[in-house]
Amino acid sequence: MTTSLSGDPYDEHIPIFSSDHFKFPINANNGSESNRVIKLLRTSDAYISKSKDDLLHRYTLLSYALKCLEFILHHYSEYLTPQLESLTYLKIAIALVESEVPEKAEAYLLRSLKLSKRNNLVLISFVSEFIGGQILAKNNPKLSISYVEEKITRYDELGLHQLSDLFRVLKVTSYMHFNPIGATNALLTLSERHSVDPFLRGISLLYLCNVLSYTDPAYDCKEKLDKAQELLFKNKRSPIQLRAMLLLLKFSILVKSGSHEESEIVMNELNVLVSAQHSEKWVEWKETGTFQIELPLPISDGEITTIFCEASWLTSNEFVIIYYALTALKMLVHNPKGNASSRALQYCRDLIDNEIQQSSSNGVLSSRIAHLRDTIIVYQAWSSFLKEKPNFNSEIEEIVRVHNRNELKDIKSLVTDDTISNILYLFGISSLADKHRETAEYYFSLLKNRKSVDANVGNECMRAYSVLAPPHLSGISKTDELKVFSTIHLLSLSEYHATKPGINDAPAAENLALMYMDLDCYARNFKPQAFSHNELSRCMPLITYWALKELFSTNSSDLVSNLETKNLEEISNSESGLAFTSILNFLLFRRFHGDTEVSKRYLERTLNSVKGSLMSRIQRSLNRFLLTSLIEELNSHADQELYEEIKVRLDFVSNNQ
């Protein structure tokens, strides 16, 4: 609902100015010419609005809108009030921006801004400056930061904090082009400002958590999400998409953290929401994935208008697909050997295949759906591997082939990096499971030597989709865990080759030393609580443990003939971090055994990581393997006291069932 400026005689009949981001009322006089102008403005609004929904005729509709506005300037210029004239210029600029020719829009924005400032038309002036800032943010995001900060300062000095807060939102958008950390800090500032409208604060908190879930998955967003839910859910202006976004993000975080019971609660809430929206035929959702956020805007004492911010998120079909994908992931992590995850993943594939056929005319949406499809294919492959029935069909191999031929478009480049890394690791560990060690080494080397894609690089629309829109199904790991695991496997294979006479294809000693240096650097900075950057991270230490046993165990009765160590039922996030720490320190102890000080440091760290009286079956098995290996390493050395201490610990671990 829109409230016009007080004193307007046309309160109930005034059209609403619409743009990509704002709507506000027109204050007209009673002249018949002005009424004709208003009707033409309404008509242009209708064409612009319709163009957002009718993508097939989008540019035709926008050209009609421009003709209406040009007709006003050519035939009614002498009857235009300063407000109507500045609005006409502004609407022309909006139509040109929507037509993707922003360079032509700038001249009209300047005319609108000059006229509105001269006549103290604050809101029109603000929208002109805001849209100008959007154009600048797209063309030169770094330069736009200083532009936005200048506007924030000026509107704060005028006491128009609601307007300056919206420029702070634009500052976030600008930062997302080149500096996600800057965007995070800007969102944090916005969410903590007491002058910010509570509803906007809730939105800021939600988007902050969304960004953090992608750029810093180890960050605990629970408290901020709860606050966002409190601010958003009690507000009648909250669109259903914001509720869906919050629940989907919370579900994503809980699934990735392995919080099974809590994720069940949120999953049920999402079930209710999906069922309700389905029964209403998704009437509040658009094919473009956009929705409106209504914000009250006091202009001065006694004068209030409304700004509608148009946000981009998901279509209803995308929302359902991601919901079921996360549900499948929850099943895959909680019970990897069950069939429920396979059925859920296949259902996602069916939805995606149907959506691809329907979205063929929308390039951005098609690219987003294609990324979801690639992600689901990878999860299906992981699911088959964890069930000890690897089934890497032609689809997953085609993803790699297309990538290697450099045939992917720029719009896919950022997200595909995660997908390819997961595939390469999967190929490597599967080859290792089949005892094809040279093939495994090939894939691990490819992964280790891949150039990392930074979080602040990539196509704008794909980054917005991945970061600001849905909870991304993978994410950018600050420590690049898959590469670290690949390095561990390469080192293990090299150590294995060194113990086998006649095998001369081990990496050169120099490369081996460099890999150990990388691992040593990572170990110095690793914190167990920072583990689980990737939703499949919880299974990585166990797969690594299994691979080490296959390569190094000298006790034939202790060998793993199948992949039983990949059963995740008994391992938590904290256990994953500790397991990884112990494996990392054990390998570095083996490497630096001849260096007394370094060796002692990693030995102490290894022993510290196997402490504890409450151990799961997986922990106990891993600790027994590590302690047995340490005894073998120390058996021929003089430190008898340390040797006996480790034997006591091994007895404790073995007998503490």
Image (tube, grey):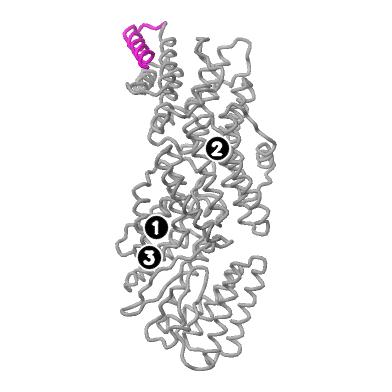
The image shows residue 575 at horizontal and vertical percentages of 40, 29
**72 in relation to 142, above or below:** below
Q: What is the span of residues highlighted in magenta in the rendered image?
A: 636-657
The image shows residue 649 at horizontal and vertical percentages of 34, 14
Neighbour tally class for label 3: few under 14, some 14-19, many 20 plus, Cα within 10 Å: many
Q: Earlier in the sequence, mark 3 or mark 1?
A: 3
| Tags 2 and 3 touching, CB below 8 Å | no
Q: Which mark is residue 204?
A: 1
| Tags 1 and 2 touching, CB below 8 Å | no
Helix or strand or loop: what does disc 2 sit on? helix
Q: Which residue is mark 3?
A: 165
Q: Which residue is mark 2?
A: 341
| Tags 3 and 1 touching, CB below 8 Å | no
**223 in relation to 141, above or below:** above
Helix or strand or loop: what does disc 3 sit on? helix
Helix or strand or loop: what does disc 1 sit on? helix
Rounded to the nearest angstrom, the CA distance separating label 3 from label 1 is 11 Å
Residue under the point 57% across and 32% down:
425
Task: Pick the quarter of the image with the N terminus.
Answer: bottom left
The image shows residue 637 at horizontal and vertical percentages of 39, 7
Rounded to the nearest angstrom, the CA distance separating label 2 from label 3 is 44 Å
Residue 186 visible somewhere in the drawing: no
Q: Amino acid at mark 1?
A: Ser
Residue under the point 56% across and 53% down:
318
